[in-house]
Amino acid sequence: MRTQVVIIGSGPSGLLLGQLLTDAGIDNLIIDRVDRDYILGRIRAGVLEAGMVGLLDRVGAGKRMHEQGLVHDGFDLSFSGRRHRIHLKALTGTSVMVYGQTELTRDLMDHRVETGGRTIYNAQNVTPHDFDGSNPYVTYERDGVTHRVDCDYIAGCDGYHGASRAAVADKGLQTYEKVYPFGWLGILSDVPPVHHELIYANHARGFALCSQRSPTRSRYYVQVPLSDKVEQWSDDAFWDELRRRLPDDVAQAMVTGPSIEKSIAPLRSFVAEPLRFGRLFLVGDAGHIVPPTGAKGLNLAASDVFYLFEGLRECYADKSDAGIDAYSARALARIWKAERFSWSMTMLMHRFPDEGEFGQKIQEAELAYLSSSEAAQRSMAENYIGLPY
Ligand SMILES: Cc1cc2nc3c(=O)[nH]c(=O)nc-3n(C[C@H](O)[C@H](O)[C@H](O)COP(=O)(O)OP(=O)(O)OC[C@H]3O[C@@H](n4cnc5c(N)ncnc54)[C@H](O)[C@@H]3O)c2cc1C
């Protein structure tokens, strides 16, 4: 089999890139190791920057997002028993869209089928080959048979544990990592959100986040030690702990119910450099991870896709390699700024037992400064809505 671009991974990065390429008349094939239902069973991100919203509209997959997504003009920071609103719209002129990654992925998958895009699911041992030369190819196994797909380029959109980054591990790949000493215990429940916008809470017992997926579906998180196991946390224990970390008026208004998903996610900052190895490109979580505090993971994947698509389009339409030559540097410049913001939000809002009282006082001073300085709020808002690309 032959195609122009093989995309490894059918997550948001792979699907968005595939659709942009298809719309530009560039033949592509997506290969994923699991099936569609498994991918749609993952509960992940939910806050979309305007850049991601624009890309979904551009590929014609934004209809349901505009019908069902929730436009948020701000969010609350909660600390010292009170709340302070960060007015995103007033400070930057821009809002964010709350729409679950699961729904966005479903929309992109459906649109791919409608527009004739090809995806191979349940492919085992997906492996990129010869990307250092001019004739790369990808092999995979299915039902005991090995298949080969020849191509011009390979896009590694296969997430943090994928085959693409593993394939370049001994080719001069440099990695930078920070692992945080806690995780987020998250619960998804069909109860109305406690507030019409998100609340990020800094509390002596640890961080909490009140998020949402729709007017009837809430997503809540509490900071927990890395040693905690999800089985230790009954729904009641979760709700009790969440209420303790929120201001009284919010805790009293909270509607609780059974969880439909409950999991613990570790927090990590990670960047791989460079993001290009000959004709293989690392895209999205394959190249970088942010802690979810700044809601940047999915949105960073979108900007990578945009830069890579522009480069590939130039290759085919203009016979110029300038865009793909610049891909790694352009993407990394934005990635590191988002890494910085996600790290700073994480440091500001979580409890770090090892930082002691000094660290605690610094955190309190920063929150007090933030709530009194419009310049500081604008800086936070500018980063939260997403830097331009
Ligand atoms: C628990 C959790 C919560 C998160 N919460 C948030 C949040 O609140 N806000 C936010 O912005 N971001 C969040 N993120 C991050 C966000 O979900 C990711 O940044 C986003 O999914 C990246 O998309 P991607 O397409 O690059 O990678 P992925 O979504 O990981 O997709 C990769 C795809 O590649 C496939 N694949 C993997 N290995 C192989 C292989 N060897 N061969 C073939 N296919 C393979 C996988 O099956 C998958 O379909 C969260 C992530 C996790 C894990």
Image: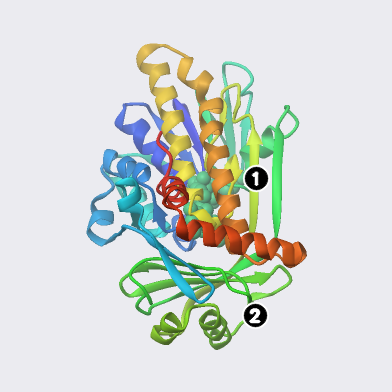
> What element does badge 1 sit on?
strand
Q: Which residue is mark 1?
A: 270
Instruction: Please report the residue visible at 42 percent of the width from the left and 17 percent of the height from the top.
Output: 315
| Left or right: where 28 falls relative to 116 | right
Query: Which image quadrant is residue 350 in?
Result: bottom right
Q: Residue 132, position in %: x, y?
A: 64, 20
Q: Position of residue 280 (x, y in %)?
A: 57, 28
How many discs mark residues in the rendered view?
2
Looking at the image, is mark 2 or mark 1 earlier in the sequence?
A: 2
Q: Is mark 2 within 8 Å of ligand 1?
A: no
Choose top left, top right, bottom left or bottom right for residue 75.
bottom left
Judge by depth and name the residue closer to the eye, 160 or 40.
Answer: 160
Amino acid marked by disc 2: Glu
Query: Could you tell me if residue 48 is visible in this image?
Result: yes
Disc number placed over residue 231 in the picture, else none = 2
Do residues under tags 2 and 1 come within 8 Å of each other at their CB atoms? no
Q: Position of residue 173 (x, y in %)?
A: 70, 31
The answer to whether 324 appears left or right of 164 in the picture is: left
Alpha carbon separation for disc pair 2 and 1: 28 Å
Three-letter amino acid code of the residue under disc 1 = Phe
Residue 95, relative to residue 13: is it above or below? Answer: below
Q: Residue at image x 71%, y 33%? A: 174
Q: Nearer the viewer, residue 140 or 80?
A: 80
Residue nearest the observer in this picture, 320 or 184 = 184
Looking at the image, is mark 2 or mark 1 nearer the viewer?
Answer: 1
User: Quarter of the image holding residue 232?
Assistant: bottom right
The one nearer the camera, 118 or 386, is 386
